Image (tube, rainbow, N blue to C red):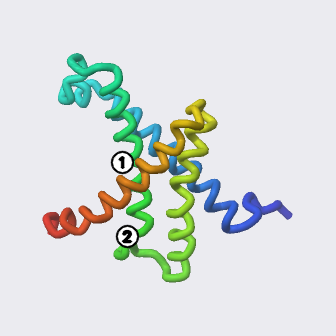
Amino acid sequence: MNKPRFESLDHMANETAAGLVQAAAGTAFQLFQNKQFRRSAGFKKLSQAEQDRIFNELVVASVVLIMLVLKAPDLRVAPEFRGYLSDLNKKIPKAHLEYLKTSGVENKYLEDWEKLISMRYEEYARDRHDVRAAAM
């Protein structure tokens, strides 16, 4: 018999969260490198600090988007799966901080990232109702 890849649902959620934040960072980097995006944002005129800030906002937006999708009330999943998705949602910020830490980001910046994720999540969660209403 094959040994299960995951020891528990919690272990599976941790691994899934880690994969999702890596995908979010990769997607943000692809957009950041996109020539049309850079031209539209006027990158040639921006300082390195401003370019870094834009990249950080792209990453946090991608991370928060994943979190919002996992909490979407109209997500079509089996009711018994909702608890898992809720747990996964809660693990995303920690997984992102761990990803940053293993990528060499200094500990002194991790608290700022934690605050930024929380702040953007609250901001985007508030605005999503207006966006959905406009889309309807």
Nearest the viewer among 55 and 29 is 55
Give how far across and how far down residue 88 sits, in percent. Answer: 55, 63
109 relative to 44 in the view: left or right: right
Is 42 above or below relative to 84?
Answer: above
Give how far across and how far down residue 75 sits, in percent. Answer: 39, 72
What's the residue at 23%, 28% (across, down)?
Answer: 36
Is 99 above or below relative to 87?
Answer: above
Quarter residue 53 falls in: top left
Q: Residue furthest bottom?
A: 79
Nearest the viewer among 36 and 65 is 65
Front: mark 1 or 2 = 1
Q: Which residue is mark 2?
A: 72
* Element at label 2: loop
Three-letter code, disc 1: Ala
Please state, as top left, top right, bottom left or bottom right, where the N terminus lies in the image. bottom right
- How many angstroms separate mark 1 from mark 2 (CA)? 16 Å
Q: Earlier in the sequence, mark 1 or mark 2?
A: 1
Q: Residue furthest top?
A: 44
What's the residue at 60%, 44% (across, down)?
Answer: 98
What's the residue at 19%, 24% (across, down)?
Answer: 42
Is 10 above or below relative to 63?
Answer: below
Q: Which mark is residue 42?
A: none
Three-letter code, disc 2: Ala
Nearest the viewer among 66 and 48 is 48
Q: Which residue is mark 1?
A: 61
Badge 2 density bin: few <14, some 14–19, many ≥20, Cα 10 Å: some
Q: Residue furthest front?
A: 108
Q: Residue furthest right?
A: 1
